Every structure is written in C-alpha cells, then in structure tokens.
C-alpha cells in the first residue's frame, strides 16, 4: 500500500493478510475507539479531522516514524450499515493525508475493551513501537501529540506517557460539583489516562482482561513498581502536552462512572500482588485517608480535612462495592456488563468552540 492509500472498513474477523501486508509494519499505532450512537456523523468527522491535524505535527517532527490509525466503530442493533458508512467517510477524509494509513473496524458493541483487544489481536505481527490511545471527545493543545511522541522516544520507548488533561465543567450541577470534589482528590503522583496516552507495545501485547474494565487502570497496575523509590517511575504525565474534555453533565451518569471506577479499583487490587495493591491504595487511591494511608497536609490543615472527608466517603462506597462483588463471587452470579456513565452524552471541545486551558 502506497503512503496515503487507505484501507476500506472491515470487520475484525475479516481482516485480510493482503491488507495487513500493505500496512506499515513498524512505527506508531494510533487507536480511536468510538461507536455509532456516540454522536452524529458530522461530529465524528470533526473529531477525526482534529486527530489527523495533531498527527501531522508528529509526522513533521518524526518523519521516520510511520503512523497507522485504527478507528474502532462499534454498532448496536440495526446500526451496522451506518457504522460502515461512517468508517468509509472517515477513511476518505484521510486520503489527502499522505503520511498516515487508516483502518476502520466495525465491531458489535458495547464495550471499549472489545475494540482495544480486537485491534491488539489483529496487529500482533506488526512491530509497532507503541500505541497512542485517545478518546473521541478530547481536544489536543498545540503540539500535544508531538510532544508525547518526542518524550516517549527520548526515554527509550518504554513505559507509558500521557497528556495533562483538563476537565472542563458544564452548566449542570453534577458537573460543577464533580469539579469541586476532584480538586480535593488529586493524587500526589500523576499517571497517564487513556483519553490521551502513549504506551509501549510490550505492556499491552497480551491484551487487557475484560474484568479490568479500565484500560488505563490496567496499564497503571502493569507498570506500578511497589519496590522502587518512585513507584510511578515508568508512568509519566507531560505538563506541556495538554488536552481538554467536558465532564459528564448528568448526576446518574456521574454516579455510574464512579461506580465503574470502583469496580476497576477493586478487581485490580484483588488480582495483583499485595505490595502493588497496597502501594496503589495508600499512595494513589486513598492518599490522605489517615490512618489507612498517609495524611495529606501539603496544602494546609483545612484542605487536608476536606480531602480526608471526601476520601472517607469514597472508601465507604469502595467497601460496599467490594462486598457486593465478593457475595456475587460466592453465589456465582458475576456482573456481565458495567456501562459507562456518559453514553449518549457526547460533547467535544474540538467540535464546538476551542477550549481555553
């Protein structure tokens, strides 16, 4: 496949050897998961153009690094034809981008990890240096992706590096409240979020177990080193590479997202060695919840008390979720599906007015 030529959308099980042979066998894999009901076709196109523009900066600074964009478009009942139509349109948009190959995958939904694992499985024989993951509702700041790639290569293409993400508030009470609460729960050490993250291929080569729920949570636990002086040494957030997105606006969606995060915390801590789980519990998730974790008075006693209160409520909820999962395990009635909290609540800064950061 010559540079600039674009593969047609395919289903995951129908990816031909000829198509794979025509793709760059090295370089950078870029993954953009989304789904038909996420937004209208125009918003999908706008977000995709925004991604291509950010990748052009990468290509200019790293002309020796091939790029292959994988768009995973999930569909529901009666949406398969629309999924293909949108994928064909997105691949057409990339025809003028002569340095980037694009593959569109139509997958039955729901479940982001289904897209992630399908793409990882299909590209197992492609020798990508790393995977750049991003969400469809993120607006990249100037040179954001270029700075991530430059830093990633500068550190030997190991571990994971992410952008500094700014959550923009919406007009709803739930969005504003979560913004105020989040200000008291920032962990002492930042780690990359899958909304904009570049991770070494070997970290995720075997795929992500479905019980992990969160792809960035899986990467965090895989790279967290409880025995190191800096347990997060292989995880980095680059301050001058930033992006933005809008918080969820509805209260029940916010609660569903928080509950999903708790499921991910519980399953990861249960499945990884105790030193790793303990480091995450005390150093990240519940940092500030004395006496279970170190007290955080770094920004004053009053703020430390507010943090302690928020973390105490969070810990109570955490215990309830853990107990529920334990009971489900005993009675052999596991959860089969855990929804995201922002389904049908799409809004991207890249689609609307530029976001001020």
Image (cartoon, rainbow, N blue to C red):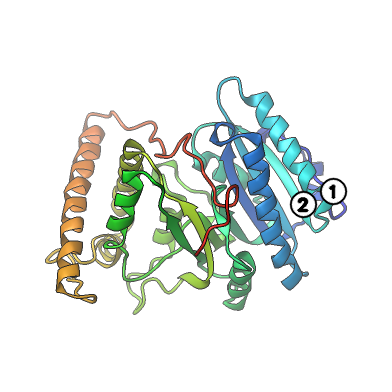
Q: Position of residue 3 (x, y in %)?
A: 85, 55
Q: Residue at x 48, y 34 (%)?
A: 344
Q: Is residue 80 left or right of residue 234?
A: right
76 lies above or below 172 = above
**Residue closest to the far top:** 78
Q: Residue at x 70, y 66 (%)?
A: 57
132 lies above or below 343 = below
- Pick whichever of labels 1 and 2 is earlier in the sequence: 1
Q: Residues within 10 Å of mark 1 (few under 14, many from 20)?
A: many
Q: Mark 1 = which residue?
A: 5
Q: Position of residue 149 (x, y in %)?
A: 62, 69
57 lies above or below 264 = below
Q: Is residue 339 left or right of residue 297?
A: right
Q: Residues within 10 Å of mark 2 (few under 14, many from 20)?
A: many
Is disc 1 placed on a helix, strand or loop? loop
Q: Position of residue 269 (x, y in %)?
A: 30, 54
Q: Residue at x 76, y 43 (%)?
A: 91
Classify residue 58 by image quadrant: bottom right
Question: Is any atom of residue 123 visible in this view?
Answer: yes
Q: Given contact means CB atoms under 8 Å apart, are the residues at marks 1 and 2 in contact?
A: yes
Q: Mark 2 = which residue?
A: 101
Indicate which disc residue 188 carries. none
* Residue placed most toward the observer, 92 or 319: 92
**Residue closest to the far right:** 2
Is disc 2 placed on a helix, strand or loop? strand
Q: Is residue 59 left or right of residue 188?
A: right
Q: Position of residue 277 (x, y in %)?
A: 29, 60
* Residue placed most toward the observer, 231 or 303: 303
Q: Is residue 151 left or right of residue 48?
A: left
């Amino acid at each position: 496949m010559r540079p600039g030529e674009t593969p047609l959308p395919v289903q995951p099980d129908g990816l031909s050897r000829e198509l794979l042979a025509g793709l760059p066998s090295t370089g950078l894999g870029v993954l953009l998961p989304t789904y038909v009901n996420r937004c209208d076709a125009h918003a999908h196109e706008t977000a995709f153009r925004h991604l291509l523009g950010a990748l052009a900066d990468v290509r200019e600074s790293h002309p020796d690094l091939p790029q292959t964009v994988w768009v995973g478009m999930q569909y529901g009942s009666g949406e398969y034809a629309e999924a293909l139509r949108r994928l064909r349109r997105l691949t057409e948009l990339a025809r003028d981008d002569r340095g980037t190959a694009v593959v569109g995958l139509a997958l039955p939904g729901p479940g982001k990890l289904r897209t992630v694992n399908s793409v990882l499985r299909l590209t197992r024989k492609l020798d990508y240096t790393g995977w750049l993951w991003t969400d469809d509702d993120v607006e990249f700041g100037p040179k954001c992706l270029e700075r991530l790639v430059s830093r990633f290569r500068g550190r030997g293409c190991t571990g994971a590096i992410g952008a500094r993400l700014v959550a923009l508030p919406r007009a709803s009470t739930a969005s504003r409240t979560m913004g105020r609460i989040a200000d008291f729960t920032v962990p002492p050490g930042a780690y990359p979020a899958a909304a904009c993250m570049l991770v070494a291929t070997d970290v995720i080569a075997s795929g992500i177990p479905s019980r992990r729920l969160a792809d960035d949570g899986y990467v965090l636990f895989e790279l967290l080193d409880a025995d190191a002086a800096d347990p997060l040494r292989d995880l980095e957030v680059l301050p001058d590479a930033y992006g933005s997105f809008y918080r969820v606006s509805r209260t029940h969606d916010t609660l569903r997202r928080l509950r999903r995060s708790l499921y991910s915390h519980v399953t990861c801590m249960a499945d990884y060695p105790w030193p790793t789980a303990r480091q995450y519990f005390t150093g990240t998730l519940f940092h500030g919840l004395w006496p279970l974790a170190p007290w955080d008075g770094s920004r004053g006693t009053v703020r430390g008390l507010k943090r302690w209160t928020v973390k105490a409520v969070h810990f109570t909820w955490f215990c309830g979720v853990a107990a529920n999962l334990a009971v489900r395990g005993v009675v052999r009635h596991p959860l089969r599906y855990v929804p995201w909290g922002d389904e049908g609540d799409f809004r991207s800064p890249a689609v609307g007015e530029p976001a001020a950061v």
